[in-house]
Amino acid sequence: MSMFRPDLLNGHKILVTGGGTGLGKSMAEAYAAHGAEVVIWGRRGPVLAEAAAEMQEKTGGTVIPMAVDIRNAGAIDEAMEEIFATGPLTGLVNNAAGNFISRTEDLSANAFNAIASIVAHGTFNTTVAAGKRWIAGGHRGSIISIVTTWVWTGSPFTVPSAMSKAGVAAMTQSLAVEWGPKGIRANAIAPGPFPTKGAWERLMPEPLAKKTGAGTGASDIPMRRFGEHEELANLAIFLMAPGCDYLSGEVIAIDGAQWLASGGNFHQLTKLDAEDWEMIGQAIRSTNQKDRSQRTT
């Protein structure tokens, strides 16, 4: 059950990138359930369309799918122009991301760019595309960017993501000051472990999870449990809601205090040997091949 009244976001229009799956879908659905018109972006059109139809049926709200690859700055600007043509956004959630684990010495420039092009460049370009239209039209706006607790601790074996997310956190604090006088707020959420279908398996194949203890339980979380999607959605609603107008420039962790207790990163992977890393490489290549196949069917 939601902690907010169902009409809290009536009159709001919110864009959620990566809104067709996982945490993005959970936040988008929560916004729609509380009266907002929601736009979801992602690379896979059929997945977005299916998710939008499901959310609309469940909430009775309006959810508009748009296939947009945020690695393409031109595509971002065209899609944002289309959105604003029917009325300005009131909120933006930068949720789209990518990540994989690897020894840093094994990374190529292309591997780094695969993450940075989504998390750093894509988030920046999407934010500016909305921000410049808010400023030109004299509109107020609220930005939420999904980061990680690694912005405070770093994260071994996920260096491209750690660097990119730290940049997004810096962007959040910078824009809170620069755009604050224009009526635009910027905050970030740093989620801890929130189970999503397939995500943990891609980052940590089961045999390695058992070897390292990563992702197999909640023993390193002081609250001794994983997060529920509704709990993250409640925070995302609060940050967009009327009455939250004075909160800006904050990076808010929602992880059961995990990062304070253990760093909340992939330090356990120092236990792996060369054979383990070869297994990880094979798992990542297999996942990438499957994803490419799904996008072309």
Image (cartoon, helix red, strand yellow):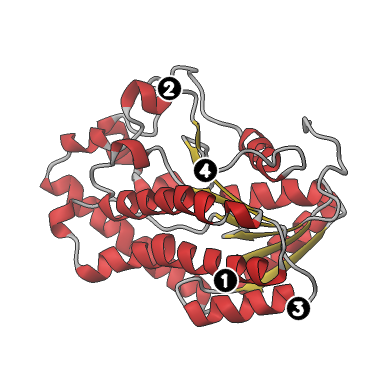
Alpha-carbon span between mark 4 and mark 3: 29 Å
> What amino acid does circle 2 point to?
Ile
Q: Quadrant of residue 16?
A: bottom right
Q: Which residue is mark 4?
A: 249
- Using residue 280 as the reference point, say whether residue 129 is left or right of it: right
Q: Note whether 151 is above or below 114 in the view shown.
A: above
Q: Which residue is mark 3?
A: 85
Q: Earlier in the sequence, mark 1 or mark 4?
A: 1
For label 4, the SS is loop
Q: Earlier in the sequence, mark 1 or mark 2?
A: 1
Alpha-carbon span between mark 2 and mark 3: 45 Å
What residue is at 52 percent from the left and 43 percent from the top? Answer: 249
Q: Which mark is residue 221?
A: 2
Q: Could you say which is closer to the camera, residue 32 or residue 151?
A: 151
Q: Which residue is mark 1?
A: 129
Q: Earlier in the sequence, mark 2 or mark 3?
A: 3
